[in-house]
Image (cartoon, rainbow, N blue to C red):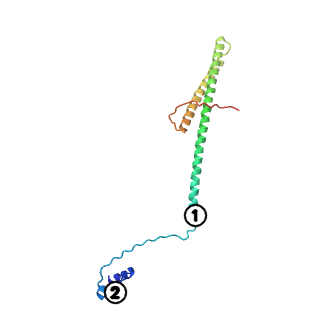
Amino acid sequence: NPVSVFATKLNQGTFSQMDFSIEALNRPDPITDNISSVSLKVPMFNGGMGIVGLSMAESGKDMAESMAGEAQEAITFQIIKTFYQNLLAQEALKVSQEAAANAKTNLDIVQQRFDQGLVVKSDLLSAMVHLTRLQEEDVTASNRLILAQKAFNMLLGDPSGKSEEHTSELQSH
């Protein structure tokens, strides 16, 4: 198109005296128009959204750090709590075993007195029931200790279930 070639040469600044000849105006040589451009849009005013976004990002970072600290404290609390539950279960088992041993001794005494005719059979049966109840409590205390040890080991990252007696002592006030 001759008009497009004429306009393109004017835009490119390449129009010369030779382009005014009638032959060049009516049958111009093909021309290509390669225009490279770069545009950059920078908002002059965005209503403070950039500052708000930066402030929100800083708040999010602070919140994430705070949550990480809280999670660490919660884990530490659970470890300490489970450790003391373990100690308490150990002491409860000791008390239960002592009570069962005392009940066994009591049953032996009642049995001797029954054999001698000094106590009635209901006293003997009562001592037997008491011993059985304490032996049952002993089994329960032993199971609680196993569970407490497993919970403590799991919190420490050792799910193997090794049962170890912990060496701290509970002190009563």
Element at badge 2? helix
* Near-viewer residue (146 or 10): 10
Quarter of the picture containing the C terminus is top right
At 56% across and 54% down in the image, what residue appears? Answer: 61
Asked if the residue at tag 1 contacts the one at tag 2, i.e. Cβ–Cβ closer than 8 Å, the answer is: no
* Residues at marks 2 and 1, CA–CA distance in whole angstroms: 58 Å
User: Dot 1 corresponds to which residue?
Assistant: 51
Is residue 65 shown above or below 45?
above
Element at badge 1? helix
Q: Residue furthest right?
A: 173
Quarter of the picture containing the N terminus is bottom left
Position of 169 with respect to 36 (left or right) is: right
Say whether disc 2 or disc 1 marks the residue closer to the N-terminus. Answer: 2
Residue 77 x/y as whole percent: 61, 41
* Near-viewer residue (93 or 1): 1
Residue 144 x/y as whole percent: 58, 32
At 54% across and 38% down in the image, what residue appears? Answer: 156
At 34% across and 86% down in the image, what residue appears? Answer: 17
**Disc 2 versus disc 1: nearer the observer:** 2
Question: Dot 2, how many residues are within 10 Å of its Cα: few (below 14), some (14-19), or many (20+)?
Answer: few
Residue 78 x/y as whole percent: 59, 40
Position of 4 with respect to 171 (left or right) is: left
Q: Residue furthest front?
A: 17
Mark drawn on residue 33: none
> Three-letter amino acid code at disc 2?
Gln
